[in-house]
Image (spheres, rainbow, N blue to C red):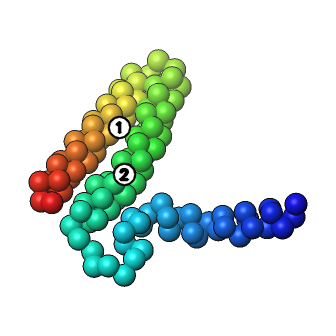
Amino acid sequence: MTKFFKKIVNKINPRNVLYALIIPESWKTSAPINLSDLNDFVSGTIVGLALNLAGFVALFFVFLGGYMWITSSGDTGKIEQGKKTLIYALAGFVLVLVSGSLVKIVVNLLT
């Protein structure tokens, strides 16, 4: 049983998993890179990572704005600041979604 688990653990190396997630399969060979691989890398990996990061940042600022609004204790200045934080977080996230879509469209048109 221990040999079996050692084989599994040796195959599941975090560096190999990260390498498999980020780098397209066709890039791991010695074949030259073509534009469809670049399309997959840009529109899949880079834009995907940027959208995930933007989603976490937007979610953080939505929570922050909601917290500021809830803890304002009726102070109109703090309520407005919380509302502005919520609005700017959502507007920024929409802007990131639109720009990510535009990048994917442009990359698809070029390939």
The answer to whether residue 84 is seen in the rendering is no
The picture places residue 2, in percent across and down from the top left corner, at 87, 64
Residue placed under numbered mark 1 in the picture = 89
Mark 1 is surrounded, within 10 Å at the Cα level, by few (under 14), some (14 to 19) or many (20 or more) other residues, namely many
The picture places residue 100, in percent across and down from the top left corner, at 25, 48
Task: Residue at 33% x, 54% y: name it.
Answer: 44
Residue placed under numbered mark 2 in the picture = 48
Residue 97 shows which numbered tag?
Answer: none
Tell which of 39 and 51 is nearer to you: 39
Instruction: Indicate the quadrant where residue 14 lies.
Output: bottom right
Which three-letter amino acid code belongs to the residue tagged 2?
Gly
Instruction: Indicate the quadrant where residue 42 lies.
Output: bottom left
Mark 2 is surrounded, within 10 Å at the Cα level, by few (under 14), some (14 to 19) or many (20 or more) other residues, namely some
Q: Is residue 104 above or below residue 1?
A: above
Kindly state the secondary structure of the residue where label 2 is placed: helix
Q: Is residue 18 left or right of residue 55?
A: right
